[in-house]
Image: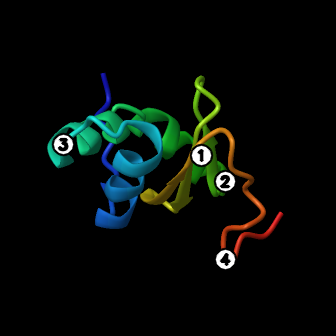
C-alpha cells in the first residue's frame, strides 16, 4: 500500500477541534484529519481545493496541505481566496 503524505496546519487542527470534534485533543484531531490523507492526495493530484468527507464536513487544502476545516453547516464560498 502506498504511503500518502500530507501536511496539516495548526489552524486546521484547531478548527477541527472547534467545529467537528470538540472533545478531541490536539493529537487526536491531527490523527483524524490525517486519516483522510488518501483523499487529500487524490484531490491535490486533480488540483482540487476541497475534500468533502462522508460526514459532509470539508477539508480545505492547498496542494497536499490541509489549511482549514469547515463543518457541514458552513458554506465553502466564505473561504478567502477560494475560486471555483
- Relative to 59, is 62 above or below? below
In three-dimensional space, the C-alpha distance between marks 1 and 4, rounded to whole angstroms, equals 19 Å
The residue wearing badge 2 is 48
CB contact under 8 Å: marks 2 and 4: no
Considering every residue shown, the one lying at the far right of the view is 84
Q: Position of residue 2 (x, y in %)?
A: 32, 30
Looking at the picture, does residue 62 appear above or below residue 1?
Answer: below
Q: Residue at x 34, y 40 (%)?
A: 22
- Coloration mode: rainbow
Q: Which of marks 2 and 4 is in front?
A: 4
Q: Quick one: label 2, few (<14), some, or many (20+) residues within 10 Å?
A: some
> How far apart are the two marked residues, 3 and 2, measured between alpha carbons?
28 Å
The nearer-to-camera label among 3 and 2 is 3
Which residue is disc 4 drawn over?
Answer: 80
Q: Nearer the viewer, residue 73 or 52?
A: 73
Is the C-beta separation of discs 3 and 1 under 8 Å? Answer: no
Q: Badge 1 is on which residue?
A: 43
- Report the Cα–Cα distance between label 1 and label 2: 5 Å
Mark 3 residue element: loop
Q: How crowded is mark 1: few (under 14 residues within 10 Å), some or many (20 or more)?
A: some
Q: Are marks 1 and 2 in contact (CB under 8 Å)?
A: yes
Q: 45 or 24: which is nearer to us?
A: 24
Left or right relative to 15: residue 13: left
Q: In 3D space, how far apart are the residues under numbered discs 3 and 1 (Cα atoms)? A: 27 Å
Of pointers 3 and 2, the one earlier in the residue sequence: 3
Residue 21 position, x and y percent, is: 37, 36
Distance between the Cα atoms at labels 4 and 3? 27 Å
Question: Residue at image x 30%, y 47%?
Answer: 5
Location of residue 46 with respect to 80 vertically, above or below? above
Percent coordinates x, y for residue 19 in the rendering = 47, 46
Marks 3 and 4: in contact by CB < 8 Å? no
- Secondary structure at numbered mark 2: loop
Amino acid at each position: 500500500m502506498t504511503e500518502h503524505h500530507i501536511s496539516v496546519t495548526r489552524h486546521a487542527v484547531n478548527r477541527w477541534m472547534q467545529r467537528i470534534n470538540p472533545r478531541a485533543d490536539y493529537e487526536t484531531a491531527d490523527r483524524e484529519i490525517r486519516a483522510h490523507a488518501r483523499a487529500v492526495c487524490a484531490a491535490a493530484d486533480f488540483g482540487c481545493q476541497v475534500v468533502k468527507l462522508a460526514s459532509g464536513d470539508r477539508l480545505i487544502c492547498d496542494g497536499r496541505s490541509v489549511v482549514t476545516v469547515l463543518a457541514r453547516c458552513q458554506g465553502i464560498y466564505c473561504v478567502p481566496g477560494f475560486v471555483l
